Image (cartoon, coloured by chain):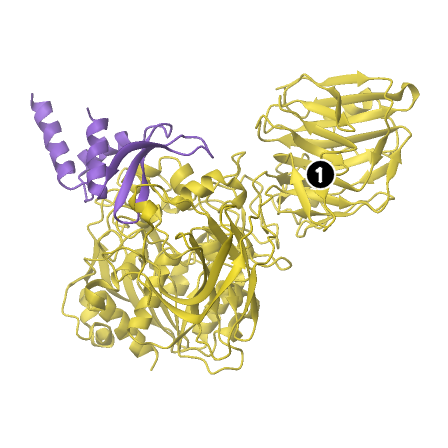
Chain colours: A purple, B yellow
Amino acid sequence: MEKNLKKNKLFKEFLKQPFAKHNLEILKLLNNLRSIKTKNKYCLICVKPFKLWQLAKMSGERGVPPKKINKFFKNLEDAERYVFKIRTK
Amino acid sequence: MRKDTYSKSAQNNKMIEKKIVGYSDALSVRPKDKISFMISCDPEIKFINSRFVKLIQGDTNPEGPGFKEKVVEYDVKKYKAINQKIYSGSYIYIPLKKEIKLLKDFTFMAFIMPTLNNKKNQSIVTSGNYPNNSFDLLINKNFCLELNLENKRLVSLKNKFVKKNWYLIGFTFLKENNRIDLFQFPINHENTSYEIRTKTQIRKIFKLSKNIGIASSVIKNKQGIIKNFNNFNGKIDNPKFFAKHVSHSTISYIAKNPGLNLKLKKIIYWDFAKHISSDKIIDKGPHKLDGYTVNFPARAMKGVLWDGEEFNWKHKPSHYSAIHFHDDDIYDAKWKKTFDWIVPEGIKSGLYCAHVYDNNNNEDYIPFTIIPSKRSKKNKILFLVPTASYIAYANDHNAINGQNYEMLMGRLTVLQKEDIFLDKHREFGLSTYDTHSDGSGVCYSSRLRPILNMRPKYSSSNGGVGSGLWQFNADTHIIDWLEHKNYEYDTITDEDLEKEGIDIIKDYKVILTSSHPEYHSTKCWDSINKYQSMGGNLMYLGGNGWYWRIVWDKKFPGIIEVRRAEGGVRSWEAEAGEYYHSFNGEYGGLWRRLGRAPNKLLGIGFSGQGFDVSSYYRRTKQSYLKEVEFIFDNVEDEILGDFGLVGGGAAGLELDRYDQNLGSPKNCYILATSENHSDLYLGVTEEIGVNMPNQSGSQNPNVKADLVYFKKNSGSKNFATGSIAWSGSLSFNNYNNNISKITSNVLNNFIK
């Protein structure tokens, strides 16, 4: 119970402001989420500079382009929130 | 001014492809001189337009001042669009004046170290115009040695190579029985056993005709253009033809004693230990079949004889007789010229671009610098365009190919169309941050190819949260600020400083550096040092400056070499024994490890880095002293730069600190120090002896930028910001902010 509360607190803090100076506890979680292998790792493709980004998955192989996903974001914070939620499900 | 617009296709969520790309034959040019542009277009584009613009601001972030350019030549010109290819891959080309028939007994042998099993044919030595090679000794798609004669497989081995191991390979021809023996012997390893396969009753003749390609099959067309195919990845050491059938036992003996000088008559003997600092390939045999390297394969590489006894190739060239070839090496794209421009007399010095575009929003901006005429009156201010650093980062694949890039950047990787284009088009070549397709580090980089990240409008994932400012576009914020403040300035490039030395900078009152002047040759280092000793003033407006030593090639323009020796923050490391530059024999690595830490020149040196959110500086007590009060004229704030387009602060990305132990002058004023950096900021690796647990921003006292000012006995005044992010804060609040004010206070004082 206590563990879940703590986890929820960390999640809320990140989701509130994805681009911020995070404490070491959140960073530990983020580093784990972000250091997965490159194949099928989420990334963003810029569609319209500073205005629109498309979600994609990296191939992990040189010369093989990322696979686009039909999901678009109008700001980068929302993209971080979306991927964070998927990864922590 | 032209407001930036985006195509309809982008609004419809389609990725804009990069359909027009180009480069120029120079990155700097003087008035009245000619500069040439080479353009390639997607085949669907029939015509392109061109015009010339003075570039003011390359950042398109709507939060910033916006893209700015001034048209300098209103006469738009129209050209037929052509599609041009790049033939990457390094090799040796040996032109043949006459055909040589090998009718008697002979043996070919070479030491090789294959480094990549790419499941493609990789030619080791071949002759004739591809695909009609008269013979081709190659590694086939199964990663086995094969010999082809007149384009047909003659014999192949079963043993697969084990990459990164040395082998003695070759074939012998015995006239009696018309017999060929193809052989492969391991050298100093047991990963494969030796193998010899024999083929008899060979009816065709071995001949060397038209040309010889080493590490690639080649074709020279009627226009004299050479194209290459089936590139070999790996090292080749001293290939040679003996005028005798060498017995199996002798070959086996040589494999065990690679240094043995076989006293046999040679037909051809290419000695790669000769002329290492050049493209020359010398044949010590009777036919003098000399040739040259193409696309800069790596030279001064450890050969089969290297045993760790000697680390400097100049002292023992015979241990460095290997050349390392890569299929993604490129020096000069060698495209056909699309147009020239004679730079008008009287034009202002500065950053300029050839803007090429079609009617469907496809475009490219090809940047260059106009430098002042030799005899013209100079402005007081000089901006040193860091082309060595631009070339070092040219076409970097960090975002799309980097390992754990998301964790390093602290956010999702954002790919631009340029990143995806470069990943697909490997032939556009690599940066010195990348590794070759075989995993070895890229130690050469050139500007004679389209450089898609040295462009206005390019947003780099390296550049922190915000505009994505890194190198070229970050520097346009300094140009934009100079223009906005109505300063008159000149620009020159690192390459000009390399060519002309102190003479080209001595007349300026102040030199402004870029946001990230990381790479410098010895001559550039010495020239700046000399300039200071003559009383010249320096404003170092960046971070991670004067970090790596580089070397410019003397014969071939626009190519640099960097050997990432010993230590430092680096995406690859030079192999033991390969720390000396091939271009001139200088020892490579960090200037700090060469006894010239940047602290001596700039007052500060590289201390920490992070790539998520930036921070701010807090003024020190010293900043209120009378001697430096001019710097803070009309600046009331104690906190400086808590705003900006790079991570939201002026202190960010790569940070430098004051440190007397590294040579920072004692009489330096520390005006402000940055604080409160995130824990994605870490201390630099060259300072990690014992890896203590307090490396990150909130715990490591060295993760900071020091803003400093010092004077030299010569009268030279020096100001240093120690942060790459500084330039991204200049335009905040319509250029009315404490970072902008401090910069202009210093500049106004320095030009007096």
Say which quadrant the C terminus of chain B sits in: bottom left
Q: Is residue B365 above or below residue B307?
A: below
Q: Is residue A22 above or below residue B182?
A: below
Snapshot quadrant of residue B38? bottom right
Snapshot quadrant of residue B478? bottom left
Residue B741 is at least partly visible in this image:
yes
Residue toward you, B498 or B116: B116
Q: Residue B178: where, in percent of width, then height?
A: 88, 21
Q: Amino acid at mark 1?
A: Ile
Give the letter of the chain under mark 1: B
The residue tagged 1 is B214
Q: Is residue B172 above or below residue B545?
A: above
Say which quadrant the N terminus of chain B sits in: bottom left
Snapshot quadrant of residue B378? bottom left
Q: Residue A61: where, in percent of width, then height?
A: 44, 30
Q: Is B348 on the left-hand or right-hand side of B459?
A: right
Residue toward you, A77 or B255: A77
- Residue at 70% x, 32% y is B111
Residue B666 is at least partly visible in this image:
no
Q: Residue B602: where, in percent of width, then height?
A: 38, 64
Q: Residue B63: where, in percent of width, then height?
A: 22, 56
Q: Is B149 on the left-hand or right-hand side of B434?
A: right
